Image (cartoon, rainbow, N blue to C red):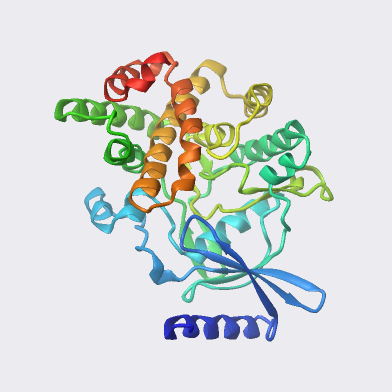
Amino acid sequence: MTSSTGADRNAAINAFLAEAGWGGAERRSLGEDASTRRYERVYQGSDVAVLMDAPPAAEGKPSGPDASVQERILAGWNGRTRLAACRVDAFVGVGEHLRSLGLSAPEVIAFDVEQGFALLEDLGDTIYKTEIENGASERELYLAATAALAHVHNAPAPEIVSAAEWRWPILEYDTLALTTGADLFPKWYPAYDEGVAFSGSLQLEFDGIIRALSDHLASLPQVLMLRDYHAENLLWLPERDGLKKVGILDYQDAVRGPAAWDLAMFIQDARRDVSPAVAREVFRGYLALTGNEEESFQRDFDIGGAINALRIIGVFARLVRRDNKPKYEAFLPREWGHLKSSLQNPALKDLKRVLEIAAPQLRDA
């Protein structure tokens, strides 16, 4: 039986759809993503749209730009890491900004911030990862997405985006957010693998190194950092022209931060291997499109890549050990490979030394 809470939510969805002019539409579940959001495809005659259901009470509230470090720590994960949680106005506002740049983010048909609903243009199912697995050209798709990303980064990063009367601040991806992510590695990986251990002094040394690297990234020029730019959040839309061939999803957590983070996330994908030749061409193509200097950008790419790999390894270890989701174990070797690759940069020699003590499997890096 449907719980009363579920029944109430379902009734609220139907009322929202009716007010948007989609009353009586057929609804089919598209499942959930890695957050508390879930999606449905809705059909009304020949028209099709996507419903995003993001219950505001399902997650802790995000912290605003004026929150102190202590207030953010007390607020919990979303406050520390600058996540938008279930704020529909963040999704709508960032999407509007991307469309203003001539990019393909879903058009918004209707939204309700207080209830956590949005009715969106249906961009289809042509996810990059699946399209490449089905024979599409990895090079063509990745170079198109590189051009779209460079276009976002070349535009001024907004401090505020708008969703009708709502305003959403684009926060800085600062030292607290960066260190909080990296801290997941010593917190959760030793529970997954007893061969990895951080003594008290080693933990303190790790913390100091991560903070210094995070301070460096936080001091770099800021772009609109989309944060989760990878092959499962991109759609191939070949019927569109130019940059609009790349459909962009899952951007509500966008922040102002270093450009190298997005490119590292894109090339060092947790869920698929990007061929080395394509990865090199993407990196060089991005530099050509943005004018970044190669040596310093490679340093920042590797620092961001290492911090992100530590974060993801910690997340996957937690999902396996605490949440009993063994499927994430299959992704760990790929992320260890990304970490090893990043640690070859001389700028990371201190982090490499500490991690080789804590995690002996890195010594052959």
Query: Does 16 sit left or right of 4 as displayed?
Result: right
**Image quadrant in which you'd find residue 231:** top right
Residue 272: where, in percent of width, then height? 60, 37
The residue lying at 39 percent from left, 71 percent from top is: 57
The residue lying at 44 percent from left, 16 percent from top is: 345
Of residues 314 and 90, the one nearer the viewer is 314
Residue 116: where, in percent of width, then height? 50, 72
Please state the total of marks drawn on the protein image. Answer: 0
Q: Is residue 153 above or below residue 103?
A: above
Of residues 286 and 48, the one nearer the viewer is 48
Task: Report whether residue 173 is seen.
Answer: no
Of residues 250 and 8, the one nearer the viewer is 8
Q: Is residue 67 above or below residue 230?
A: below
Residue 355: where, in percent of width, then height? 31, 23
Q: Is residue 1 above or below residue 184?
A: below
Residue 140: where, in percent of width, then height? 77, 34
